[in-house]
Image: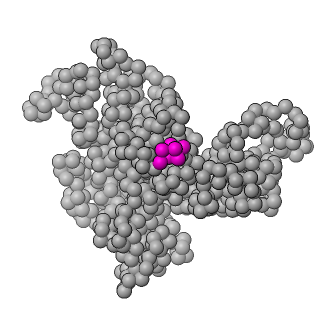
Amino acid sequence: MIPPAFKHDLLARTDIVEIVGRYVQLKKAGATHKGLCPFHGEKTPSFTVSAARQTYHCFGCGVHGDAIGFLMAHSGLGFMDAVRDLAQQVGMQVPQDDASPQERQRAAEMKEKQATLSSVLAKASEHYRKQLKASSRAVAYLKGRGLSGEIAAHFGLGYAPEGWRGLASVFARYDDPLLDECGLVISHAAEDEGAEAKRYDRFRDRIMFPIRSVQGEVIGFGGRVLDQGEPQRSCGEDSSAKPVASQPKYLNSPETPVFVKGRELYGLHEARAALRKHGFALVVEGYMDVVALAQLGFPNAVATLGTACTAEHVQKLFRFTDAIVFSFDGDAAGRRAAGRALEASLAHASDTRSVRFLFLPPEHDPDSFVREFGAEAFEQRIAQAVPLSQQLIALAGEDCDLSTVEGRAHLLANARPLWSALPEGALKRQLLVELAASGRDDIEQLKQQWGQPSAAGAARGKAPGRPPPRRAGRVSQGTANLLDRAIWLLLHRSGLWATLDGGAHDLLAAQPAPYDALFRVIERSIHEHGELAASALLAELQGSVPNDAGGGAVLARIAAFHAPLADGDLALELSLVLSKLRLQAVDDELKQLFESGVDSPDAQRRSRELMETRKRLKA
């Protein structure tokens, strides 16, 4: 729990002008400072920062808040991460009264470990940058790709020279285990007892792309060969020996305590302001595409890190923008990647968000397309990108002969699990109409078959012969009970919100409507007012979430719960609820996969992943 007094003291010690000034160019204007708003595109400054009030406000888009709120909005930090960031800067210790000594120790050890690894990676990044300046060959390669020195410096590009132990001159101990843990060095056990283990640099003769967290810390690297890949030899092998294989064009850092590929996006740190200015994120497939597009006037591009797009990637992007355009090659591999991106986006595709798919000719990537046809032609392609609804129907209809009854039935069978993953709302309702038309099926019959209330059934309050309509939001009864309990616990001890980590905040924010809106109101209210009494927070929720969205029914149920016992351990109960929510989410998806009857390789792979996750959560 973060006591209100601590928050007030923290903000009193923080200079908001200095914090905001790191990201926004501010100029003194009377008693305030002014600059261009980082949250929307503008040419005339309407963004003001007040040192006296320690707040920021934009007269253009209406954003307002304190230093904590600015870090949350601009850097995508959770409340606790923003508090820790500020506290570290002013030398304050964040209280952790509700955590056990063991939990505090584990948290401190993990944070220290992450800081240590980040400092090692930052030192390596600085070394690679120096080596780039010293290598005329590497500089010539980047110039040949059309990159300027300014854009290379903006992304921190570097060069890992040839040689097996280049980092030995950078770090005092080349046998330091931290180099292995960071993924900078590869170690092989000695074949003979008593012999020295083989150690060598992971990255050799490669252009280095530092991968940064949203906060700007180096958490990993991507390395690209300067040509199409030279034959690879083992460390210490004679140069005349036969090569083992060709080096991969791109080589990424392995996953570490600070780097998880399924959560991070290359270029997101550099693109944050551009995402808000341009109004959408452009997701491409390679590091070089991101850098080259920034050079060519598209600084809002990001890339996945050698892995398929995940729901966590989509959720992270939606912290900064309400629109995503995925760019893929038009070949079979690009279509498969688009299918995975669509599946990752479904749960987050609310009525106020946009997800679209851009397919380029197979012979082009975004970089080459812009260079050949120009930025205007690429912008035209973006404007014509396929919306998620059309892409879902196209994906479901692949290899289906829609001129036959069987083919149309196959399309609907493929579409059902995809459509079911969408949150409740106008998009989901209207897409059902489109699917019925594509499958030449009766809309009322399809509603009945897929568990939706028909028009006649809704008029009577129920439809005989089928289950009652679901509540707002696609959520199982078990999940609904857990979410109700989580809100109830936060109502009666709102300070618990500040004790949750970013993963817990993300878990709650990603729930279907109306729960997503309820948790957003809780976060905003606690951030603006500090810890609130149950009645005050309930009033905030009732005044902010419309009844027709389902929020009123949820709050009515919660208000009828018994008040907690004075000595009840609500923090422990909330922790257990969150653990059960994670497990319930896995069970719900497994059930959905089973009921869909889809037995594709992707479905089988996802089932295996979910079973592994379930084992970990149950352990």
- Which residues are drawn in magenta? 368-374
Image coords of residue 469 (percent x, y): 20, 33
Task: Report the side of 278 relative to 96 (left or right).
Answer: left
Query: Number of labelled discs?
Result: 0
Q: Is residue 86 visible?
A: no
**Residue 616 in the image: above or below residue 133:** above
For the N terminus, give its image quadrant: bottom left
As drawn, which residue projects farthest toward the left?
A: 460
User: Is residue 318 in the magenta section?
Assistant: no
Image coords of residue 46 (percent x, y): 33, 72
Task: Report the side of 2 relative to 255 (left or right).
Answer: left
Kindly identify the residue that appears in the image at 23 percent across and 50 percent down. Answer: 551
Task: Report the side of 100 relative to 32 (left or right).
Answer: right
Magenta residues, dominant SS class? helix
Kindly identify the residue that appears in the image at 49 percent across and 41 percent down. Answer: 309
Kindly identify the residue that appears in the image at 32 percent across and 59 percent down. Answer: 522
**Residue 589 in the image: above or below residue 172:** above
Task: Report the side of 133 relative to 145 (left or right).
Answer: right
Image coords of residue 301 (percent x, y): 48, 51
As drawn, which residue projects farthest toward the bottom?
A: 30
Q: Is residue 465 visible?
A: yes
Image coords of residue 90 (percent x, y): 53, 76
Q: State the image quarter where residue 493 is shown.
A: bottom left
